[in-house]
Amino acid sequence: MNDLSKACLDEAKNSMQSALNFLEKELSKIRAGKANPGMLDGVKVDYYGTMTEISQVANINTPDARSIVIQPWEKTLVGAINKAILDANLGFTPRHEGDLLRIIIPPLTEERRKELCKAAKTEIENSKVNIRNARRNVMDKVKKLKDKAVPEDEVKLVEKELQDITDKHIAECDKIYTAKEKEIMSI
């Protein structure tokens, strides 16, 4: 296999692995009944006119499996952080305790668990689409290899290997979903 073929396969592997990494990051935001600082990822607070992630302006801890404690570095931010969390509509309400906020994670109902599984499934499907798009983009490059004097049987070999890589990453998505669904549905 020549360098062009290997470069195409490496590009496909990198793109597909990036899709899996993004998927795992997104799934970590979907709560499964226990407290996780990642649940607040993406929640931004107005910090002197700039929208800033909460993790950039406060310490976020999980003292136990059912609560998250947010301690802002500046006491004046407690109200702004509280408002940002409420506006994010995450399904829980922070409670003021002096110069910090405490979030008690309520137990999940069966209906809420099913909604979370549906949200996880949506993320999985988006990831599969990204993997297939990466395959399509690389496949277009592989087809152009024929113009660059690469033997046709090598192009066929690269296409087959590309499909094998795609299938492996799609199977990994399904495996990740199965684990997340089990995590969400377990009480």
Image (spheres, rainbow, N blue to C red):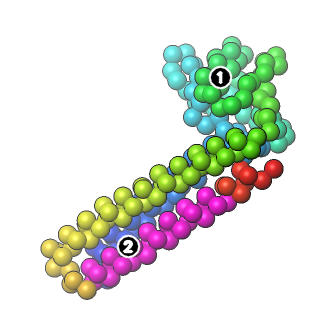
Residue with the mark numbered 2: 162
Which residue is at a point 38% across and 73% down the rendered structure image? 162
Would you identify the image quadrant in which residue 9 lies? bottom left
Report the amino acid beneath label 1. Leu
Q: Nearer the viewer, residue 99 or 168?
A: 168
- Does residue 182 appear left or right of residue 142 in this picture? right
Within-10-Å neighbours for mark 1: few <14, some 14–19, many 20+? some
Q: Residue 62: within the magenta?
A: no
> Could you tell me residue 41's position as x and y percent?
61, 37
154 over 145 or under it: above or below: below
Dot label at residue 86: 1
Would you identify the image quadrant in which residue 85 lies? top right
Q: Earlier in the sequence, mark 2 or mark 1?
A: 1
> Could you tell me residue 22's position as x and y percent?
52, 51
Q: Nearer the viewer, residue 45 or 56?
A: 45
Question: Is residue 74 something that shows in the picture?
Answer: no
Per the model, the C-alpha gap separating discs 2 and 1 is 45 Å
101 over 90 or under it: above or below: above
22 over 151 or under it: above or below: above
- Magenta stretch: dominant secondary structure: helix
Q: Quadrant of the N terminus?
A: bottom left
- Does residue 1 appear left or right of residue 96 in this picture? left
Q: Residue 174: within the magenta?
A: yes
- Does residue 51 appear left or right of residue 57 in this picture? left
Residue span colored magenta: 154-179
Within-10-Å neighbours for mark 2: few <14, some 14–19, many 20+? many
Question: Is residue 134 something that shows in the picture?
Answer: yes
Would you identify the image quadrant in which residue 142 lies? bottom left
Which residue is at a point 36% across and 79% down the rendered structure image? 160
Dot label at residue 54: none
> Could you tell me residue 143's position as x and y percent?
22, 71
